[in-house]
Amino acid sequence: MASLCTSAIKAKYQICPLISSSSFPSLNRSTHIISLRRSSRHVNSFSTQKRNLSAVSCSISNSGLRESSFQGGESFFRSVLASMESVYLNRNPTAKAILELVHSVDGDQICYDHFAFRTFGVNGYGIDSMASFFLDYGYTPRVELRFPAKKLKALWFSPPSIPISKNGSGAGGPLPRIFISELLVDQLSPETQEIIRKYTEVSGSGHKHASLASSLGSLTWEKPLYSEFQQLARESEYAAWTLVNGYALNHVTISTHGLKSHLRNIKSLNQFIEENGFKLNSEGGNLKVSPDGLLLQSSTVADSTSFQFSDGTTKSVPCSYIEFAERLVLPQYKNLSEKEVKEHHRRDGFEVGNADKIFESTYTEQLTRKAA
């Protein structure tokens, strides 16, 4: 079988994306096969890892094996997702309240478009640390996104294709995409690098247990000093957030087109949310639209929580938020009836411009506007 791969990531592994960033509207997710191969430059480093990323293959037979393997461990996998979701909802009353509001209008079924996590790109604490869990359960790496101004990169993962109960909702519904971002620590000031390395180094092997930390709501390192949090916040609010929240879910995203009521239109949902007293992230406008017009996203402003630093100082710090995404039908499927349209007929992937503004849902400027 001819390979469809093009090198999308010049890092530890090569990824064969389903679609390139320049051709999102024209390609069908279901007709392409993705492969993950180890780069020859990194064979030695990969051989030392417990989880071998090269196990993700582009062959149809291996894809079937992955799905079969997932189904064997589906109960456990979903229980981990549910634990991550529970920690997230307990810490973020806005997200919990909005989900309850949507349920009250739309019924019991709410599908998640994606789960998002933040990481430090140092000492093994970057994307790989959280990705390994999802790779083990059949997720496929897709496309890397870069955010130079924020000194970030991100990678998203598509879930295995498995039969889904029609009644499944939330963590029990269709498997979400996974979006994992990473702070490029080496590009930060020496002072900020020193703080981040200090906590990741004393964490020991904490990066190997990222998914466990997320499902428990625990940091894998010690609580920092307030002065260290302030130093990070001055240079990178993303860094400061990650220092005090660790691998906790940064946000979940409601798939609006999966709703049944008028709220399936993201503009109607945004209006509904604001009418109920919740603030949306206004950076770049309340509604973020991809250049092709097929991916529409919005988000609330993050909640805040009281955090006691290691020096005894107690301050309010940003937690998480909830996002909304509407994926429109690709042009080549515009003649399908509403009942015929499936997820693979819709715009897939993510958009740098949209995501860049969504990141700021935890930023001080947005939280200040929320409090006003």
Image (cartoon, grey):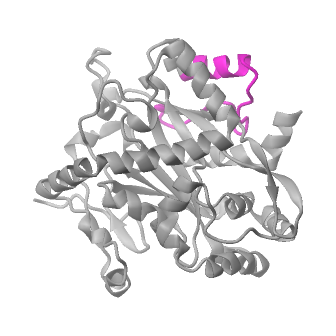
Direction from residue 133 to residue 214 in the image, left or right: right
Residue 342 on the magenta segment: no
State the residue in front, 14 or 133: 133
Q: Is residue 165 above or below residue 229?
A: above
Q: Is residue 158 visible?
A: no
Q: Which residues are magenta?
A: 266-295
The residue shown at (72%, 38%) is: 301
Farthest residue, direction bottom: 44
Residue 287 on the magenta segment: yes
Q: How many marks?
A: 0
The residue shown at (55%, 42%) is: 86
Q: Is residue 371 visible?
A: yes
Residue 237, quarter of picture:
bottom right
User: Whole-percent x and y of residue 340?
Assistant: 25, 19
User: Whole-percent x and y of residue 69?
Assistant: 22, 54
User: Whole-percent x and y of residue 17?
Assistant: 33, 55
The residue shown at (80%, 42%) is: 367
State the residue in front, 228 or 70: 70
State the residue in front, 33 or 231: 231
Q: In the rendered view of the protein, which quadrant contains the C terminus?
A: top right
Q: Is residue 323 above or below residue 65?
A: above
Q: Is residue 74 above or below residue 62?
A: above
Q: In the rendered view of the protein, which quadrant contains the N terminus?
A: bottom left
Direction from residue 110 to residue 14 in the image, left or right: left
Residue 341, quarter of picture:
top left
Direction from residue 223 to residue 28 in the image, left or right: left
State the residue in front, 321 or 87: 87
